[in-house]
Image: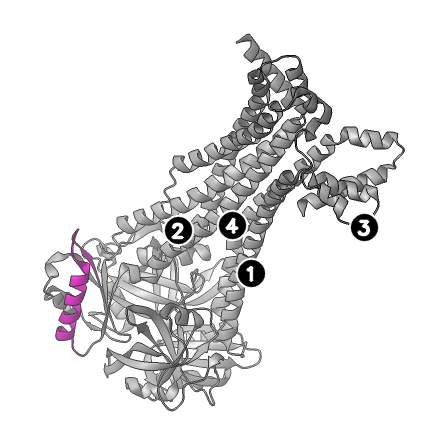
Amino acid sequence: MKSFSMWMKWSWRDLRSRWVQVVVIALIIALGVGAYSGLSSMTRWRKITADNAYESLNMYDLRVELADGSAVARGSMLAVAASADSAGVVAQAEERLRVPTQVATTTPDGEVVVRGTVIGVPLDAGGPSVNALFPKDGRPLDETDIAQPNALLERNFAVYYDLPAEGTLTLSGGQQVDYVGHALTPEFFMVIADGGGFFAQASFAAVFTSLETAGDLAGLPNAVNDLVLTLEPGADRAALESDLAAAFETGLPDVGVVISTKEDDPAHSLTYEDIEGDQQFFNIVAFLILAGSAAAAVNLTARMVDQTRREIGISMALGVKRFWIALRPMLMGVQIALLGVVLGVLIGWGIAAAMRGLLESFLPMPEWLTPTQWDVFLTAALVGLIIPLVAVTIPVWRAIRVAPVDAIRTGHLASRGGGLAPLVKKIHMPGDTFAQMPVRNVLRAPRRGLLTALGIGATIAVLVMLVAAIDSFFGAIEKGGEEASGGIPDRVIVEMDSVYPAAGGPVGVVLASPLITEGEATLRVGGELGTGDRAIEASVEFVDWQDGLFRPDVVEGSTPGAEPGIVIAPKAADDLEVGVGDKLTVRLPRRTGPVSFALESMDLTVTGINGHPFRSVAYMSTEQAALLGLEGTANVVSVVATDGVETGDLQAEFLRIGEVTSVQRADAMARLMEDLMAQFVGIFQLLQIVVLILAALIAFNAASIAVDERRREHATLFASGIRRRTVVRMLVTSWSFEKV
């Protein structure tokens, strides 16, 4: 015990004598441990929180939507669903009314007008039980709000614009409702744009109110167009889906329906896809940081132990047992490991907390569950403990196996052999002897140089990945804005709540406005693109490719000709595994009555690929609207404002038209996403700071140890009359060559 105490004191002396190097190595280990544990914990938190949120708010298992523009009498959809053969497995079912609209409100920064939807939900049983509303700020809706102009405002939109708990909203046609609180609901944990973009909370507002109020606002009293269902545990969802399709085909033959699962919901799927995608990305980042720190720590700790080789040789010459000789540096390695792990756990908690704060601001959830991921921290801690021990064991084992006289005579280079240094003699190198000496020093210990290069190389790789990811995000957003504008930067899109004659009605009112110089009425419908068992949702716009105001670019293939065809986005082509000339099955709504549409399936040739970065954007020719019985109709008007007229002026002008649901610049979504992503980049900036600190610590300690190793050599050079700048040049050259 006395001997152990003595060796402990000696190890402490060693640590104190090199305290700067010790602290830096511990910090390198800590950053690797902290980054791994912090990043891995974050993605687990998101998965746990999302699972809890969807379960607690009872998200639907199946959803039945009527085709765009369709509506039926209240109770009709429930009755048809009840007639399905396997209706007995349904646990809960509720009808809703979804109505597109404009939403205008006053924010702390002024007036804002965005596209939105009014969602009428049943309140007669205490509020919706399927896709329940979780109130945040303000009060919930109850039976007293039935048929009253009261509503809840979707939380993401409210948070983005810093809206109070209560306020007034102006909807299409100048109708007003009072919102009494903010609400979260499973369908909008993540707000998805029609074009496929996420983080669309800045440009979209969902307004929840009673079924009765929604019907009054839309001029559709006692009407519904949406049905959500949950199933009993263990129920055959696929069988019920098939039975519902058959029941609605029989019960409502003139109305098309789309039956989807919660996994088909874009917000639900993207929430989990985003978690998985982030997990993979952050796993790579965490691994590279941990690998870089491990390589650097092994190298630096080993080099620090090498500096004691002379003392090891003297101890062996004095007859000290090899166990006690090895114990001293091993104790030093254990203490460095413990210091690094403790700091790493603290850094990991700090990184995870910072990440959680950033995510909470982007993804409001009813409750964020952040239990400590002990297995993750334990794994990282074990790696942090092993790294210095391995780093110490290797040089100590190498040192105690040589003859004492060799260890004493050659110092830190004992028993290394010549390494690759003999190559210097065989290869003609430019410069004088002093220029060649740094290269010789590096080549005498190639393993050491390789580990240092791996440490710094890993950090550089992480930095490149982070910069590339940021550039990719903003590149996609910029490309989306360019494609949406169609070469007309000031193009404004006016959307309608249904289809109308292209030359009259509300479309004619918009086209006749004195605030615009040009206008074009077009048709845009929601549908589905599929091949075999693959299918994606799509927004299909019918375009006048010859003389239209808006003509999308075709980067591959050509525009549709006389024969029906379709132009799709590159991501859609990849997802569906099709190219120019291949066939697609396209399902689009075909008019069957004033407020009824059936879904029509048709096989179309992919004539071209558009450059839009969002997969759900597709285009057909105006003439092909006849396939849907919609020739001569429009629900979108592209306009160019008169000089001096701003988008806000157009929004104020068209807000009074009840049929108008949105007035936005064509590139508005790209601009808003760019602003949001600029905030989201904070996560990557945090990682960049961690990586830069790690790289600086590795470089500093490598240079510091390199100087210490050659103190005797430098002293000899100074004594020989070598100028100081020559020695400094040798040091810089050696260090730089090692990093390269």
Q: Badge 4 local density, few (<14 within 10 Å), some, or many (20+)?
A: some
- Helix, strand or loop at disc 4? helix
- Helix, strand or loop at disc 2? loop
Q: Earlier in the sequence, mark 2 or mark 3?
A: 2
Residue highlighted by disc 2: 364
Up/down of 140 relative to 17, above or below:
below
- Pinpoint residue 561: horizontal percent, then vertical percent: 40, 89
Amino acid type indicated by mark 3 = Pro
Q: Earlier in the sequence, mark 1 or mark 3?
A: 3
Q: Which of the two residues, 154 or 266, is positioned nearer the viewer here?
A: 266
Residue highlighted by disc 3: 430
Nearer to us: label 2 or label 4: 4
Q: CA distance from mark 4 to mark 3?
A: 47 Å
Quarter of the rendering containing residue 250 = bottom left
- Helix, strand or loop at disc 3? loop
The circle on residue 683 is 4
Q: Earlier in the sequence, mark 2 or mark 4?
A: 2
Amino acid type indicated by mark 4 = Ile
Q: CA distance from mark 4 to mark 1?
A: 14 Å
Q: Badge 2 local density, few (<14 within 10 Å), some, or many (20+)?
A: some
Q: Is residue 250 one of those drawn in magenta?
A: yes
Q: Is residue 221 one of those drawn in magenta?
A: no
- Pinpoint residue 480: horizontal percent, then vertical percent: 49, 70
Nearer to us: label 4 or label 1: 1
Give left or right: position of 32 versus 407: left
Q: Which of the two residues, 467 or 621, is positioned nearer the viewer here?
A: 467
Give the extent of the magenta segment.
228-254
Whether residue 615 is visible to the viewer of this picture, yes or no, is: no
- Pinpoint residue 171: horizontal percent, then vertical percent: 37, 68
